[in-house]
Each structure stands twice: as C-alpha cells, then as structure tokens.
Amino acid sequence: MKTKKEIAIKILKNEKQIIYLKREFYYLKKLEGKLITINFSLGLSHIPKTHDFTFKAKKVFFTMELFGPNLNQHKNISSHNKFNYLLQMVSALEQVHSKGVVHQDIKPSNFVQSLNPVFDTRLFLIDFGLAKTHIDTDGNVVPPNEVKNFVGTLSYASINAHKNIVIYHFNRFFSV
C-alpha cells in the first residue's frame, strides 16, 4: 500500500536493543487493540500507531507514526500548556494501565507532540521497550517479582524504584 504519509523508522542491529524493540512493538500492538484504546476523558488515543516489524540482513526495522518534538525539547511552556500536558500525561497513563501495562520509563522525552500540533494538540506516549504487564488476561494483578536491577531513568523514577521495590502502575504517577 502506498501513501504519502510520513512515518518513523527505527533500525537496530544490536541484539540487546532488538529485545527491547520487540517488547515495544508487542506492547504498542497490544495497546492499539480494539478493547480499550480510547481515552474516555478526551475521546482520543495517546498511543502511537505501529505499522510493521521486519527482520532483514540481521537488522530490525520497526515503523510507526512520525511525531513532532518531545516535551524535553521545549524550553518555555506556558502555565496553560503545562496544565494541558499534565492532564494528557495522566490520561495516557490511564489508557496504558487500563490495558494491564506498566510503561516503566515515564519522562518528558517519552511524551511527544503530533507532527502538526496546530491541528492535533495531543501528546503521545512512546518508548515501550521497558514495559511489562501488571494484570493477566483474567484481570488479576500479576504477583510481584523481586527486582534485581533498576529499570527506567534515575532522575524520573519513583522512590520505590530507587529502593528496588516492585513497580506497579500506581508508582508511575510519581514521574508525572
């Protein structure tokens, strides 16, 4: 299928990175599912659309929507926009958690604007390479595992993450 729509392409050949990319693609596809992908408070999804995941010549190609700048790239944000972004970040996390997924790396650089923020003011949550499931297919909370290594970004992690206490979805709001 040919379109004139721009897309983002991630290309990796490092084996460790490929594992994270497979996980990211898996969780994004899970979150794109038709069950609960609509943000009920705004009526909009904050999850990127993925297109393809391909292996060729010992490299992985992962294609998805193309986005504009991330929140870390903004220097002067008005109070109004900060509040709007905060609401969207919480909304995005609610959307992800409702599908039983914990992102595990919430930070400003993982929230991106649409490619054309004049017409689409949504923020999108990206980079699901460290994500994990916290609810099984029957809706039960997955029992905690012992945390062996720190996961995430130190400066945005919850206090529990710094203490190597198991991370659940309610710890993630600390980062916001």
Image (tube, helix red, strand yellow):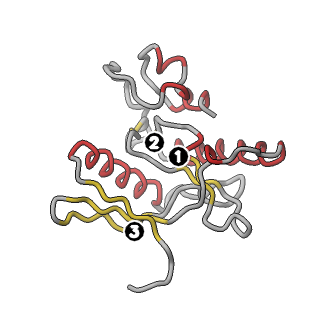
Disc 1 element = helix
Instruction: Tell me if mark 1 has few (under 14), some (14-19) or many (20+) residues whose alpha carbon lies within 10 angstroms of its own.
Output: many
The residue to which callout 1 is attached is 96
Tag 3–tag 2 contact (CB < 8 Å): no
N-terminal of the pair, mark 3 or mark 2, is 3
Residue at the left extreme, as displayed: 57
**Total numbered circles:** 3
N-terminal of the pair, mark 2 or mark 1, is 1
The residue to which callout 3 is attached is 51
Rendering coords of residue 43 (x, y %): 68, 60
Picture residue at 49% right of the left edge, 66% below the top: 65
Task: Decide: is 114 above or below 100.
Answer: below
Cα separation, mark 3 vs mark 1, equals 19 Å
Disc 3 element = strand
The residue to which callout 2 is attached is 101
Decide if residue 107 is on the left or right side of residue 117.
left
Residue at the bottom extreme, as displayed: 2
Task: Decide: is 4 above or below 48.
Answer: below
Instruction: Tell me if mark 2 has few (under 14), some (14-19) or many (20+) residues whose alpha carbon lies within 10 angstroms of its own.
Output: many
Residue at the front extreme, as displayed: 75
* Front position in the image: 131 or 108: 108
Q: Which label number is shown at residue 41? A: none
Rendering coords of residue 20 (x, y %): 32, 45
Picture residue at 55% right of the left edge, 62% below the top: 67
Picture residue at 47% right of the left edge, 40% below the top: 103
Q: Quadrant of the N terminus?
A: bottom left
Disc 2 element = strand
* Front position in the image: 39 or 11: 11
The residue type indicated by label 3 comes to: His
